[in-house]
């Protein structure tokens, strides 16, 4: 998503620009998974939530 057109380097400006939205979506997903765990659903062990 935040890679340059050559697919060999990261576009730092794009990383900074999209970080806030990434963080919102990340936190939302973590909270969703925590809620599942509290309700007795099993999560894969590599997720460490």
Image (cartoon, grey):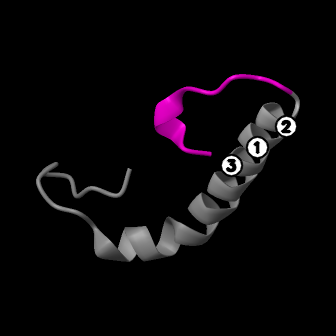
In the image, which residues are magenta? 40-49
Q: Position of residue 34 (x, y in %)?
A: 76, 43
Q: Residue at x 23, y 63 (%)?
A: 10
* Mark 1 neighbour density, 10 Å: few (under 14) some (14–19) many (20 or more): some
Mark seen at residue 34 = 1
- Sequence-first disc among 2 and 3: 3
From what the image shows, is residue 16 above or below residue 46? below
Compute the Cα span from label 1 to label 3.
6 Å
Element type where label 2 sits in the image = helix
Q: Residue at x 15, y 60 (%)?
A: 9
Compute the Cα span from label 2 to label 1.
6 Å
Compute the Cα span from label 2 to label 3.
12 Å
The secondary structure that most of the magenta stretch takes on is loop
Is the residue under label 1 in contact with that under label 2 (CB below 8 Å)? yes
Tell whether position 47 is magenta.
yes
From what the image shows, is residue 40 above or below residue 18? above
* Quarter where residue 33 is shown: top right
From what the image shows, is residue 35 above or below residue 20? above
Is residue 43 found left or right of 15 in the rendered image?
A: right
Element type where label 3 sits in the image = helix
Tell whether position 42 is magenta.
yes
Q: Which residue is mark 3?
A: 30
Mark seen at residue 25 = none
Element type where label 1 sits in the image = helix
Q: Position of residue 43 (x, y in %)?
A: 63, 27
Mark 1 vs mark 3, foreground winner is 1
Is the residue under label 3 in contact with that under label 2 (CB below 8 Å)? no
* Mark 3 neighbour density, 10 Å: few (under 14) some (14–19) many (20 or more): few
* Mark 2 neighbour density, 10 Å: few (under 14) some (14–19) many (20 or more): few
Q: Which residue is mark 2?
A: 38
Q: Residue at x 55, y 26 (%)?
A: 44
């Amino acid at each position: 998503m935040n890679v340059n057109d050559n697919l060999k380097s990261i576009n730092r400006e794009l990383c900074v620009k999209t970080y806030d939205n990434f963080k919102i979506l990340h936190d939302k997903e973590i909270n969703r998974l925590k809620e599942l765990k509290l309700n007795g659903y099993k999560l894969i062990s590599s997720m460490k939530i």
